[in-house]
Structures are given as structure tokens and as C-alpha cells.
Image (cartoon, grey):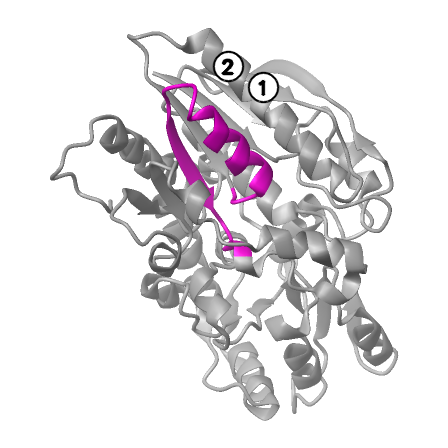
Amino acid sequence: MNLCLCFGYFPETIEEDIISNTKCYLQNSANVLQKKFIEGIACYFKSFTIINAPFVGYYPLKYRSIYVPKTYFQHKEGNATIDVRSYSFNTLPYLTHKERKYKCKREVSRWLYKHQNENDENVVIVYSMHMNFILACAELKKKYRFKLITIIPDLPKYFNTSGKWYSILHQKINNLMKKDYVDELNCIDGFVYLTEYMNREICKEERPYVVIEGMVSYKSAEESHIHKHEKFILYTGTMARKYGVMNLVEAFTIMKHNKDYKLCLCGYGDCISEIQHLSREYNIDYKGEISNKEVLDLQKKAALLINPRVNEGEYVKFSFPSKVMEYFVSGTPVLMHKLDGIPLEYYDYCFTFNGTKLTEIAQQIDEVLDIKESERLFLAEKANRFILDEKNSKIQCKKLVELIKIILNKHENSVNHI
């Protein structure tokens, strides 16, 4: 069997260039998850190809350069040899989608032509529901025989919901991305979802799928987690009001004790000016948009990690916050609301809010910080082991491998969900 991944991650050869050219909304979460998929897939295949177009924003509003350079190379991941073909493209609104679709189709077509014969099964795995990848593969399905699997981290109708940051032209392009995907879905043979609810929304027909809410590196178990916790509370992620960030900030300002703790926040979004204003009066440290390595280091040092997102809005059912995995594996205690998109098993390893009012949030933070540190860290260590042992890239990607087997050997009585 031959395997090709159509991804949008940041190859190490151009990653620094992408980070330095990104003005805002660096696609850190998507980049990290794709790298974990690559790492996990490499545990089960001796070789595969990645056809790549890094997920970056439009020039000039969100990206400084008018184009992203190409980079072609081979590298080893475990015992697997990976052929990476990350093609160049412009970042101009609308034109970038035309070029990325054309080049994706060209590269995948070359790969299929090279591997097409009666004895080989070809499988293409696409990350996300971006039109460029899906349309390119849908057109190639008319010419070549291959199986297509799509990893869906977000539903199309929830792409780029922060419309106030876009010009009229950008918003129109985003609206095109939210159109009905019915025709394109017909060519997809299997799905990987982050939550169970996604299948009910995306696929109205019976088609094989798996739920992989996220993963951490299986290599993380080899790292040391001994660290000293400092007196600060931390939130890392998008600084958006809809994610409850201002609830956290405002609740922090009315905490009745534990006033020697600082609130640290990292990320970019629509709450920045309000946060910066409050930081002049309260012990709040807004660090801006920092590298993923810096984020992970802060998570290990914090006394408490908070996810302030509340269980409101339809989108919550279709989302598994990537920070939950990061938080749990850090070895730092976690406090969060119960969300429909997070499996119940996760709540055995964290503290949860009992209400959404500012006074209730403030009281709950105080109560958790008042718990004996050894008890908090005991729960945090259990969370760390749960993620490393049950949600690492090797274990999670085994579900994807089983999905491929079902699709390649599909019978009428095949089990649809594994």
C-alpha cells in the first residue's frame, strides 16, 4: 500500500521563516497536531509522502511575505522514510486558493501516476476541509483509483469566525469556504473526527470513521517532568471573548484571597486591548503571541492551568480544545468547564467549574489554589500518565491504521465506527 498525506504543517526547513512572517493567528495548534499525526503514522509505515502547503494567512493583513517558498527533502521519523514536497504559493487573497488547488492537484497527480498499478492500493489522507485540498482530490478521483480519507479538526461553517479582522474581500472568501460540501463529500471514503458529534453534522450516509480528539508525542514519556511550580495562573490560546477569556480575567480581579498569584495569558485575539488595560491595575501579565516551546515551558511552571471556555454555542459540540492535551501532559493541575466536545473520561483528571458567573469562577479558582499542593499535583500526575499512556501518537494513530484497513477491505457488514 502507498500512502500520501496532503497537509499544511510547517516543515522545519522553513518554519522560522513562516513564524517570522506571520503577523497574527499563527496556526500553532494545527501545526502541532499534524506533526503528531506524522509521528504516529511513521510507527506503522516504512515510507510515505507528504504533499504540503503550510497554513498561513493572507498578505498583507496576516502575513508579511507575498509568497511561501517551496522545500523538498527526505527525512527519517523512527524507521520510516518520509518524502516531503512542500510547494511554493502566493499569499494574495483569492489567488492563493487558485494556486494552492492547482499545485496540490499537480503534485498528487504525479504521486498517483508514479504509484498507480493493479497490485497497489493508494491512500491519500487530507488534513482539514479546506477547499484547495478537497476539490483537487475530488477531481483526481475521476481519473485515478485511490481511497481518500479526511481528517476534520474543524467544521467548515466555523472557519475563521472572527470576521471583524477581515476586509470585505477577505470575508467574501471566508464565506466561500463555508459553502455546502455535499459534492466534495461524496468522494471521501472515510473520516477522522475530533468529536463524535462531527459525524452527525458532516456525513449523512453510513461511512467509516474514527474519533481522534488529539494526541501527544509518544516520545514525551522519555522527557523529565520534574519542575518547580511558580505562583501564577496560566491561560494559553486564542484571546477571544467567545472562549471565555474575559470571564477569566474579570474573575481574577475579584478573587478574595490568593492575591499573591499572577495571571499570565499568551495568544492573540479580540480581547487584547481590554486585557492590556486591566494589566495596568491588576497583577496580569499578557505575554502576547509566543512560540509553542515557550508556551509548553510556561505550562510546566504554572501553579494552575485554566481553560475558561464555557459550554455555550453549537460549535462547542464540534470542538476538542487542543490545549486540554497540552495542559494534561504538562504535569500542572487543570481547571476547566465541562464541554460537550470533551469525552467524560477526561474529567477524572482535572478540576471543574461549578458555574459560569464571575463570582463563581473566582471562588472556584480560590478553592482549587487552597487545596494542599501535594493533592493538586497528585491529580496532575494522574492526568499526565493518562495522556501519555492512552492518548499518545502511536496509540491514537493505530485507530487511523485500522480505519485504512476497513476502507481497503470494506464489506457490506463492515463496522462503521472504530
Q: Residue 320: image x %, image y %?
A: 47, 58
For label 2, the crowd category at 10 Å Cα-Cα, with few meaning under 14, some 14 to 19 and many 20 or more, is some
Whether residue 374 is visible to the viewer of this picture, yes or no, is: no
Q: Residue 146: image x %, image y %?
A: 37, 23
Residue 230 lies within the magenta run: no
The disc at residue 111 is: 2
Would residue 315 appear left or right of 266 to someone viewing this image?
left
Name the residue nearer the viewer: 111 or 380: 111
Please state, as top left, top right, bottom left or bottom right, where the N terminus lies in the image: top left
Would residue 336 appear left or right of 401 to someone viewing this image?
right
Task: Check disc 2 and give the amino acid type.
Answer: Trp
Against 87, residue 128 (above or below) is below
Name the residue nearer the viewer: 340 or 115: 115
Whether residue 246 is visible to the viewer of this picture, yes or no, is: yes
Q: In which quarter of the image is residue 90?
A: top right
Q: Residue 196: image x %, image y %?
A: 34, 57
Query: CB of mark 2 within 8 Å of CB of mark 1?
Result: yes
Residue depicted at x 57% and y 24%: 105
Residue bounds of the magenta highlight: 128-156
Against 14, residue 58 (above or below) is below
